[in-house]
Image: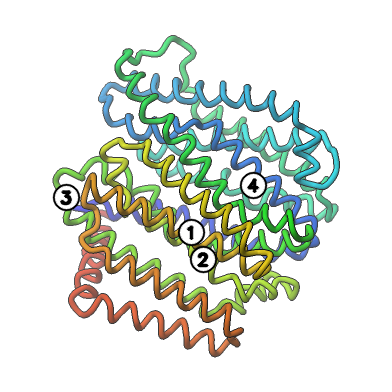
Amino acid sequence: MIVSNAKRLMAYSAISWTNALIGFILIPVATRLFPPAELGKINLLISCASIAYVICLLGFDQGFLRFYYDFPDDRKRRSLFSYCLKISLSAFAVLGVALCLASNWLSIAICGNPDVFTTIALLLVVLAQIALRFSQSLWRARENILLFAVSSLLMAGITKFCYMFAGFVSYTYDAALFSLSACSVLSFVVVLCLVSRTLSLRKTLLDGVSVKELWAYAIPLAPSAVLSLANSYIPMYAVRAGFSFGDVGVFSMAVTLSAVVSVFATGVNSFWPSYVFKNYRTRQKTIQRFHQLFVLALSSVVLAVIAIEDVVLQLLGPEYLAASCYFPFMLMGPYAYAVGETAGMGLHISKRSRYFALIYLAALASNVALCIALPPLLGMRGAALASSLSAVVALSLKAYLGEREYRSVSSMRYMVVSLLVIFSVSVANASLDLGSLQRFFVAAAGFVAILVLYGPEGLRDSVALLGQGCRSMVRKG
């Protein structure tokens, strides 16, 4: 049962919560060290680096994790890791050349003027992220929680707060570039030291059939991952196209803040795929019950954040209170992604990875169309609304296609109604211009509606599953 794995689940969750807590505490520091316009440029660079890094992965990070358990021989597992990493580094070399050739165009899009140091910093960030991602996958597969924690902390540093170190010296984008580059180089060296015994430069031990299956699984995930990440950043690029760097700064920090929802999901999603791959044949009922509990818990978190939205945004500074009218919409993106990871497990189990490209292509198309149509009419609210609606498109397709392959959800009504409640609360906040107290009561009403949906039986089942997990953790602690 899942309860026998509760200790590992809590450990992975604790790592995610710690990293997110550090980032959350440092967000107000960043907004006070850097003007919104400078933060806008920094966040644009990090977003472009994140997309480039996902392109370079080519899906082989997930391919490594999916096929790791198919090889009982440790030598083949090491060979699998080395092979997947080599493919991604080769892709990085090719993409690096392309980005250098497009350096002027790229730097103008990010910071407004030609700057070769922007391209260099971006490439260093990409290289560090590739290394850290494979390091995370390796230690997750080996269930080495300590080294997974080190890799996760370094990854969080690169994407969330390393640039802040420069803010104590100079409040400029150029200073942030130097700090980010130095931290990226240091992280890459640390990863090399951690995985040096696993890496092999010799010819792969994988047979032709295994290599073919690996490529068939991984490559379709590459466009899926790129489309998924691009989908989350398109609204920010829409703001960049139609508004000022200062508006980009406010919007991008609101996006960063909305990731607090992911804090409660990342630990679960770090552990859950491995658990499902091992147990989907024998523990389907547990998998379904967990999804139901997960939806309840995450919906509660989203509504709680909406209820105290003004307090959260006030931490960033008075300039960021302008985001209060659209911030709830931005919470729906990470919510839909996290729930989709449990609802769409059937696609991973059946190795139908090609469907992910179609899912994220549909979400991307809807996002682009909405970003063209809504911001001119609704301003920043339109960009946030486009982001939330495209996330719902992706979630709907994942759940529908995933359930055709494997029933990981006992009933769709919990997910659908919870999503409608959150969306209704967000619309009320955006259209009625609610005050702090009014927003609190509207969010509370939404929470009550979800409790009514679950009913006594559903709540008892969820509490029982949670209690079993806690008791198992105590027994094994």
What residue is pinned by disc 3? Answer: 283
Give the quarter of the image for residue 28.
bottom right
Q: CA distance from mark 1 to mark 2?
A: 6 Å
Q: Is residue 457 above or below residue 23?
A: below
Secondary structure beneath dot 2 equals helix
Q: x%, y% of residue 149?
A: 48, 46
What residue is pinned by disc 4? Answer: 47
Left or right, 21 with respect to 179, comes to: left
Q: CA distance from mark 4 to mark 1?
A: 16 Å
For badge 3, the amino acid type reads: Arg
Callout 1: 10 Å neighbours few (<14), some, many (20+)? many
Give the quarter of the image for residue 309.
bottom right
Question: Residue lying farthest left?
Answer: 282
Assess whether mark 4 and mark 2 are in contact (beta carbons under 8 angstroms). Answer: no
Q: Which numbered circle lies on residue 334?
A: 1
Q: CA distance from mark 3 to mark 2?
A: 31 Å
Mark closer to the observer (3, 1): 1
For marks 4 and 3 on the same chain, the one whose residue lies earlier in the sequence: 4
Q: CA distance from mark 2 to mark 4?
A: 18 Å
For badge 2, the amino acid type reads: Leu
Q: Is residue 470 above or below residue 305?
A: above
Q: Which numbered circle lies on residue 324?
A: none
Secondary structure beneath dot 4 equals helix
For badge 1, the amino acid type reads: Pro
By what rule are the colours in the image chosen? rainbow
Secondary structure beneath dot 1 equals helix
Secondary structure beneath dot 3 equals loop
What residue is pinned by disc 2? Answer: 331
Assess whether mark 2 and mark 1 are in contact (beta carbons under 8 angstroms). Answer: yes
Residue 33 visible to an observer of this rendering: no
Left or right, 27 with respect to 199, comes to: right
Q: CA distance from mark 3 to mark 1?
A: 27 Å
